[in-house]
Image (tube, rainbow, N blue to C red):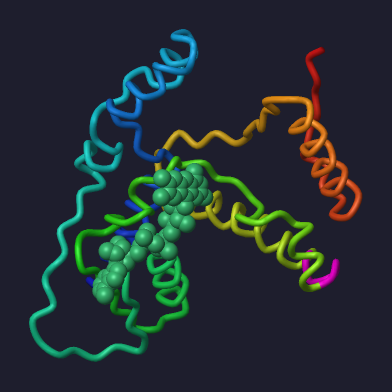
Amino acid sequence: MNQNRRNILKTTIVAGVGYGLGMFTQSKLQNKQQTLPSSIINDAFSGCSDLPFYKTNPQYSVNFPTLTNSTECDVCIVGGGLTGLSTALHLANTNLKVLLIEKNTIASGASGMNGGQILNSYECDMEFLEDKFGLSVAKEFWNLSLLGIDIIKKNIEKYNINCGINMGSSIVAFNNKHYAELQEKYNTLKGNYQYNNLHSACRK
Ligand SMILES: Cc1cc2nc3c(=O)[nH]c(=O)nc-3n(C[C@H](O)[C@H](O)[C@H](O)COP(=O)(O)OP(=O)(O)OC[C@H]3O[C@@H](n4cnc5c(N)ncnc54)[C@H](O)[C@@H]3O)c2cc1C
């Protein structure tokens, strides 16, 4: 394996871990303590340190050289966040010579400070995409977001990323109106997208 390929793999592992675990800092813990019951806090944040997981584990430490002179490559990618790293990995796997340039350190942007939740769907509602592009295109978007999760899972397995992945999430309504909205989204995803991985529960 050449050095470039090795570097890309290493960076992807770092991003994968950053993505999988996110960054739980003491300051976040303190903020949350103001609003959440202490038992939940203790469970969720036990054993957390000030630093992201990948920065406290020597096996994921990376140290890349500064680019000092001109070089040749098939594709040059600017930015070592999830987008750049994922693109670099996919292209490198097709035997292209890829150069990834990062102005700070790998995952120094949003990718190294996110919540680490692997969720499908988009920033906007599926209804928005349906209105804009029609149901069949919206379905393609939906399937792509599911594919994204598969890619993450496969990468974790393929590159043996020991990040304690856990699947599943819950969205909790904070009032009746919100509950009705969630119920509507639930019905949309079940009906229009035949998505059956959702469970709805209501505590009266
Ligand atoms: C607080 C927070 C929580 C989040 N939680 C989640 C979550 O739980 N789940 C989820 O899926 N998503 C979450 N996200 C969103 C997710 O983190 C981002 O969508 C994702 O990290 C974006 O990746 P990116 O590679 O596009 O951008 P970035 O990670 O920001 O990467 C861009 C990189 O480009 C570099 N760069 C910029 N300009 C240049 C230049 N001129 N030359 C060289 N390098 C340059 C930057 O230094 C940076 O490293 C969260 C985001 C935030 C901010």
| Residue 184 sits inside the magenta stretch | no
Residue 188 picture location, percent across and down: 85, 49
Residue 34 picture location, percent across and down: 40, 17
User: Who's the residue at 44% across and 77% down the image?
Assistant: 91
Does residue 186 lie above or below 84 as drawn?
above
Does residue 152 lie above or below 203 as drawn?
below
Of residues 19 and 160, the one nearer the viewer is 19
Q: Report the predominant secondary structure element of the magenta stretch.
A: helix
Does residue 202 lie above or below 165 as drawn?
above
- Of the 4 image quadrants, the one containing the C terminus is top right
Residue 100 picture location, percent across and down: 29, 74
Residue 10 picture location, percent across and down: 29, 58
Left or right of residue 164, residue 48 in this image: left
User: Who's the residue at 21% across and 59% down the image?
Assistant: 105
User: Who's the residue at 22% across and 36% down the image?
Assistant: 56
Q: Quadrant of ligand 1?
A: bottom left
Left or right of residue 142, residue 118 in this image: left
Check the image and name the residue furthest to the left.
68
Q: Which residues are magenta?
A: 134-138
Q: Is residue 191 visible?
A: yes
User: Who's the residue at 81% across and 65% down the image?
Assistant: 130
Number of marks in picture = 0
- Of the 4 image quadrants, the one containing the N terminus is bottom left
Check the image and name the residue furthest to the right.
191
Q: Is residue 156 visible?
A: no
Q: Quadrant of residue 144?
A: bottom right
Q: Quadrant of residue 93?
A: bottom left
Of residues 160 and 172, the one nearer the viewer is 172
